Image (cartoon, rainbow, N blue to C red):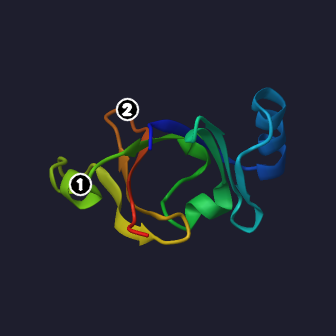
Amino acid sequence: MSVHPRIVADDFPATVRFYADLLGEPEKVVADFEYASFDSAGETVLAVLGRRAAETVLPVGRGDGGVLVVVPVPDVDTTVAALPAGTVVAAPADRPGWGVRSAYLRDPEGNLVEVQTWLPR
């Protein structure tokens, strides 16, 4: 799993189409959850997530721009425990539909960051 950007899109279909025109068809699309990933050599290089879906797991609003950075870590809970107070905006939680455990943070500039670890299969 590699670090990659995730676009939070108000118009999921149009945003996926835009990036498909640039990058080719997405490797994975979960239309009912509004998620698509564009992969290269088995690794996600860009993901698109509909804003409604994003809002189910974190407090993201239009003022947040539209990009968050996804960072894989060995253990989400250990990583979050080591962070300064006030950094975490959504505590670690399993996301079985995504196959990950993740938490959401804000960097010093206020940008959203997702840290994640694959769940055991």
Between discs 1 and 2, the one toward the N terminus:
1
Q: Position of residue 7 (x, y in %)?
A: 62, 42
Amino acid type of the residue that numbered disc 2 sits on in the rendered structure: Glu
Label for residue 109?
Answer: 2
Q: On the image, which quarter does residue 106 sit in?
A: top left
Q: CA distance from mark 1 to mark 2?
A: 18 Å
Q: Residue at 58% x, 59% y: name it.
A: 54
Name the residue rendered at 35%, 49% in the picture.
105
**Toward which corner of the image does residue 30 lie, by quadrant?**
bottom right
Q: Would residue 65 be visible to someone looking at this image? A: no
Residue 16 can be seen in this image: yes
- Helix, strand or loop status at disc 1: helix
What amino acid is labelled 1 in the image? Val
Left or right side of 39 for 14: right
Mark 2 Cα shell of 10 Å, populated few (<14), some (14-19), many (≥20): few
x and y percentages locating residue 67 in the rendered image: 56, 39
Asked where in the image residue 56 lies, by quadrant, the reply is: bottom right
Q: Nearer the viewer, residue 102 or 109?
A: 102
Quadrant (top left, top right, bottom left, bottom right) of the N terminus: top left
Left or right: 11 as drawn, with respect to 46:
right
The residue to which callout 1 is attached is 80
Q: Residue at x 54, y 43 (%)?
A: 64
Q: Is residue 113 above or below residue 95?
A: above
Q: Residues within 10 Å of mark 1 (few under 14, many from 20)?
A: some
